[in-house]
Structure formats: structure tokens, C-alpha cells
Image (tube, rainbow, N blue to C red):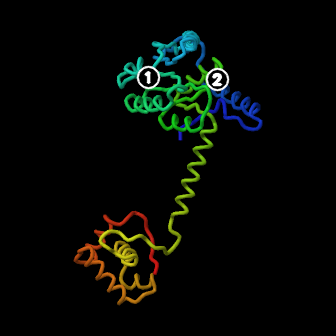
């Protein structure tokens, strides 16, 4: 998971103090990587594109950023007006775009842009956080997801961190991702075999018992070992092996093992009745 910094978490009990702490820690990190005044003079402007449908807000952002290295090369009302200039041969570019109007389309375009130009940085601006939308933006490859109510200082420091390869997202998205990962892990553990269990029969009409015996052949088990595993006689194992060879049209145990390796699922298990 990418490193992510939380500027403005979703509302929760004690949100005000929590936000103050998050903000102060964020600004401390931002200042720790802030170039000196001499370095600032040597920094070359970053090709920045601003997309904001609201003309007044667009002009305000343009003026705010005009005194920084992120002075917009183009300030447009739609993504279509700048998308051609952010292609694979554009090098490092920063796209600051409104995500409130057509969130789904911007995420789609972001994913496409990232595939074409890995050096592109996408900062999405929204009126309010919606966890589903934040998650979609995160997975599309967006580098920052900011409220339009943030301060000028936070915006610029966020851009600095994004250029350093960091991601700026509300902390709630991290909690959501962790919860999802925990649920997926629990689901895997719940479905993992914990001893003998039945498997659904594969192709060729093999029974459950024949399927698990075939897995034993794939592991190189002898008839004696198979008999001990399932508490049956070696004679019964021989009957099952003969039936397996006939059904999968194999001439011997080696051919049966080769067939099993390519036809049985990756999940392993022992048998049941």
C-alpha cells in the first residue's frame, strides 16, 4: 500500500482535535522536506494543468498557484481540453482536477493517464468526502484527494509531497482498506482446509474419493500410504486407482499424476468418506 497522509479525516467524535493533530503532523512532515530559499530559486517550474468547471474558482486557484513552481500551464474547464498534453511523452506533469462533477469519468481518465504516463501526478479536488468515491480514486491511481476547503499552504505542501512520491488521502480510506484486507484474510482462512474434507469432483466424472486419491498419486503416495491415510484396504485403493486410470484415459500412475497436475484445482485437501 502507498504511504498516505491524512489532512482532513471524516467526521468522528473529537474530530476537531484529531484534525488539529493530523494537520500539525502533516505540516511538520511537509516542512521537513521543504527546500531552502536557495533551492527554491533553482527549482524549475512543474508542468501543471488545472481543470475546474467553476470559472471563478478556477481563476482563484490559478492565481494562488501562479507564485509557485506549480503555476498552471493551462487552466481549463474540462479534462478534454488538457488530456492531449498529458500523454506518454509529456514527462512529469501535475494534473489538478475537480472530481465533484463527474467522479467516475475522472477516475477512468486517471487510470488511463497513469497507464500512458507513469510520471503523471493526479490531484483530485472535491466538496465532500465519500468513502466509496475515495476508494475508487485511490484504486484508479490518484495521488491526492483533497477537499476544496483546505488552505493554500496545505495545497502547496500536498503538491510537494506528491512530487516526492507520497499519496495524500483521508485517513478513513486507510481504515477502510485495512478492514477489507482483514475481511479477505479471514475469508481465506475460513475457506482453507483444516484437515480431511470433501472436494467437488473434477472433470471426467471422478468421484470425491477418486479425486482425493488422484491427488495422492500426484504427490507420489504408494497404495499403502493411501490406504493408511483413509483407513481403507490396499485392495480398495487398487480398485479406485484402476477406475481413475480408466476415466482419465491414463496408462499408469505417472500419466495420472501428470493429468492431475494440469486438471485439478490448486487447492489441496485430503479425503472424506
Task: Name the residue located 53 percent from the left edge and 70 percent from the top edge.
Answer: 194
Q: From the top left corner, tell me how far across and down residue 50 is, in percent.
A: 50, 17
Q: Characterize the local packing of mark 1: few (<14), some (14-19) or many (20 or more) Cα atoms within 10 angstroms.
A: some
Left or right of 23, for residue 56: left
Along the viewing direction, whichever of 78 and 85 lies nearer the viewer: 78
Residue at image point 41% right, 70% down: 200
Q: Secondary structure at mark 1?
A: loop
Give x and y (percent) for residue 5: 61, 33
Q: Residue drawn 48% across and 73% down? A: 197
In which quadrant of the rendered view does residue 204 lie? bottom left
Q: Which residue is mark 2?
A: 31
Neighbour tally class for label 2: few under 14, some 14-19, many 20 plus, Cα within 10 Å: few
| Depicted 155 relative to depicted 134: above or below | above
Q: Nearer the viewer, mark 1 or mark 2?
A: 1
- The spot of residue 122 in percent (x, y) is 49, 26
Quadrant for residue 113, please give it.
top left
Q: How many marks?
A: 2
Up the image or down, 248 lies above or below 91; here it is below
Q: Is residue 31 above or below residue 249?
A: above
Question: How far is the residue under mark 1 from the one under mark 2?
Answer: 23 Å
The image quadrant of residue 257 is bottom left
N-terminal label among 1 and 2:
2
**Viewer-nearest residue: 65 or 59:** 59
Are discs 1 and 2 less than 8 Å apart at CB?
A: no
The disc placed on residue 218 is none
Residue 71 lies, with reference to residue 218, above or below; the image says above
Q: Which mark is residue 92?
A: 1
Q: Residue at x 46, y 19 (%)?
A: 78
* Secondary structure at numbered mark 2: helix
Please indicate, yes or no, whether residue 44 appears anywhere in the rendered image.
Answer: no
Q: Is residue 44 left or right of 35 when viewed as pictured?
A: left
Residue 35, position in %: x, y? 58, 19
Amino acid at each position: 500500500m502507498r504511504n498516505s497522509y491524512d489532512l482532513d479525516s471524516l467526521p468522528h467524535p473529537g474530530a476537531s482535535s484529531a484534525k488539529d493533530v493530523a494537520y500539525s503532523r502533516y505540516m511538520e512532515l511537509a516542512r521537513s522536506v521543504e527546500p531552502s530559499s536557495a533551492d527554491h530559486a533553482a527549482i524549475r517550474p512543474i508542468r501543471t494543468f488545472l481543470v475546474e468547471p467553476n470559472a471563478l474558482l478556477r481563476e482563484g486557484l490559478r492565481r494562488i498557484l501562479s507564485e509557485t513552481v506549480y503555476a498552471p500551464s493551462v487552466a481549463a474547464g474540462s479534462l478534454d481540453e488538457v488530456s492531449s498534453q498529458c500523454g506518454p511523452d509529456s514527462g512529469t506533469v501535475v494534473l489538478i482536477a475537480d472530481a465533484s462533477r463527474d467522479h467516475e469519468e475522472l477516475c477512468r481518465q486517471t487510470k488511463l493517464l497513469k497507464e500512458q504516463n507513469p510520471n503523471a501526478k493526479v490531484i483530485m479536488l472535491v466538496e465532500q468526502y465519500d468513502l466509496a468515491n475515495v476508494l475508487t480514486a485511490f484504486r484508479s491511481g490518484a495521488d491526492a484527494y483533497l477537499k476544496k476547503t483546505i488552505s493554500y499552504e496545505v495545497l502547496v505542501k500536498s503538491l510537494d509531497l506528491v512530487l516526492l512520491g507520497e499519496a495524500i488521502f483521508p485517513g478513513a480510506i486507510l481504515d477502510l482498506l485495512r478492514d477489507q484486507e482483514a475481511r479477505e484474510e479471514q475469508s481465506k482462512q475460513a475457506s482453507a482446509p483444516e484437515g480431511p474434507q470433501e472436494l467437488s469432483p473434477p472433470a471426467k466424472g471422478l468421484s470425491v474419493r477418486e479425486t482425493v486419491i488422484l491427488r495422492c498419486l500426484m504427490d507420489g503416495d504408494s497404495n499403502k500410504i493411501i490406504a493408511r491415510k483413509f483407513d481403507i484396504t490396499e485392495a480398495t485403493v487398487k480398485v479406485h486407482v484402476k477406475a481413475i486410470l480408466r476415466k482419465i484415459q491414463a496408462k499408469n500412475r505417472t500419466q495420472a499424476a501428470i493429468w492431475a497436475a494440469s486438471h485439478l484445482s490448486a487447492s489441496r485437501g485430503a479425503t472424506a468418506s
